């Protein structure tokens, strides 16, 4: 099977797996596009590792969100699911191992740091997608899904005291607001990125986000 046919098959599988989750599927293709962009600025990137990793990185998203125990980590489960898919597409063991590393290391919380250029590019692309214009859109889509408000009345420190943090996550998602996500999560993203180009893009995206949230605050308060 040639490489293009393999990618086609992978895309078909991803579309089926994420068919009930349009925003996750759209996210996968934005991440894929970002990966191709970042790859142009780095040396010795193996696209035969990066492309399947980007397409498969969130393959276990639905399993994680449907599991109520909170024990499923989509990065870990996703790397196992990817292994089966890739083996079925006659990928060799060496490539499967490298792709699995990219998938397992794409998440902040797994404790698996990306240690190849392909894994770093995937990590950076995945994080870049939650900031900037697409980040704003995504945050408000999720806010709608969870019935969140635009902003909380109490100051952030009071809010944090009232909402216990578990594994770096605020417990009650419905009490989250896009402002809190911005303050707690998005602002820190550019510093966590690995590649130079991603840091550059991250700073620009964050600046845009900052302007947006400042403006939104002024409008909420009736100042502008
Ligand atoms: Fe993910
Ligand atoms: Fe992702």
Image (spheres, rainbow, N blue to C red):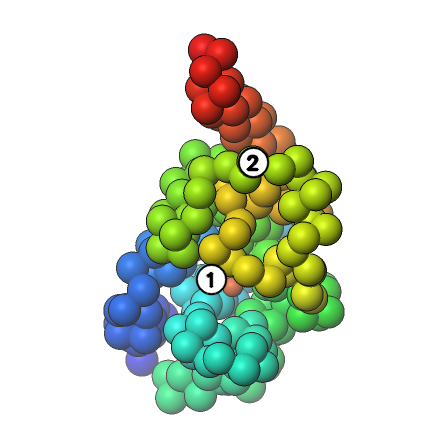
Q: Measuring 40% from the left and 43% from the top, which residue is drawn there?
A: 140
158 or 199: which is nearer to us? 158
Numbered disc in front, either 2 or 1? 2
Q: Quadrant of the C terminus?
A: top left
In the picture as drawn, the residue positioned furthest to the top comes out as: 224
- Image spot of residue 105 (x, y percent): 64, 67
Q: Is residue 20 visible?
A: yes
Give neighbour class at mark 2: few <14, some 14-19, many 20+ (Cα, 10 Å).
few
Give neighbour class at mark 1: few <14, some 14-19, many 20+ (Cα, 10 Å).
many
96 or 25: which is nearer to us? 25
Q: Measuring 32% from the left and 75% from the top, which residue is drawn there?
A: 17
Q: Is residue 184 left or right of residue 79?
A: right
With respect to residue 37, does 223 lie above or below? above
- Image spot of residue 71 (x, y percent): 58, 81
Distance from the alpha carbon under mark 2 to that under mark 1:
39 Å
Q: Is residue 182 visible?
A: no
Reading the image, the residue beneath label 2 is 153
- Image spot of residue 150 (x, y percent): 45, 38
Residue 54: assigned label: 1
Looking at marks 2 and 1 on the same chain, the residue that comes earlier in the sequence is marked by: 1
Q: Quadrant of the N terminus?
A: bottom left
Quick check: is the Cβ at mark 1 less than 8 Å away from ligand 2?
no
105 or 19: which is nearer to us? 19
Q: Measuring 70% from the left and 43% from the top, which residue is drawn there?
A: 158
With respect to residue 166, does 185 lie above or below? above
With respect to residue 139, does 17 lie above or below? below
Q: Measuring 46% from the left and 80% from the top, which residue is drawn there?
A: 67
- Image spot of residue 48 (x, y percent): 48, 66
With respect to residue 177, does 110 lie above or below? below
187 or 69: which is nearer to us? 69
């Amino acid at each position: 099977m040639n490489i293009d046919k393999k990618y086609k098959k992978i895309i078909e599988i991803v579309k089926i797996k994420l068919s009930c989750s349009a925003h996750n599927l759209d996210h996968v293709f934005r991440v894929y596009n970002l990966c191709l962009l970042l790859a142009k600025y780095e040396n010795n990137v193996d696209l035969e590792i990066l492309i399947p990793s980007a397409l498969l990185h969130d393959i276990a998203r639905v399993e994680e969100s449907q599991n109520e125990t909170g024990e499923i980590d989509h990065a870990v489960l996703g790397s196992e699911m990817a292994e089966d898919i890739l083996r079925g597409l006659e990928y060799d063991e060496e490539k499967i191992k490298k792709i699995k590393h990219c998938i397992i290391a794409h998440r902040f919380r797994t404790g698996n740091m990306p240690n190849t250029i392909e894994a770093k590019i995937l990590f950076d692309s995945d994080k870049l997608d939650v900031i900037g214009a697409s980040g704003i859109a995504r945050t408000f889509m999720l806010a709608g899904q969870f019935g969140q408000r635009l902003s909380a009345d109490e100051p952030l420190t009071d809010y944090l005291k009232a909402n216990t943090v578990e594994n770096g996550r605020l417990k009650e998602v419905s009490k989250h607001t896009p402002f809190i996500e911005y303050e707690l999560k998005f602002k820190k993203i550019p510093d966590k990125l690995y590649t130079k180009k991603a840091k550059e893009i991250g700073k620009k995206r964050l600046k845009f986000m900052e302007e947006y949230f400042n403006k939104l605050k002024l409008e909420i308060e009736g100042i502008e």
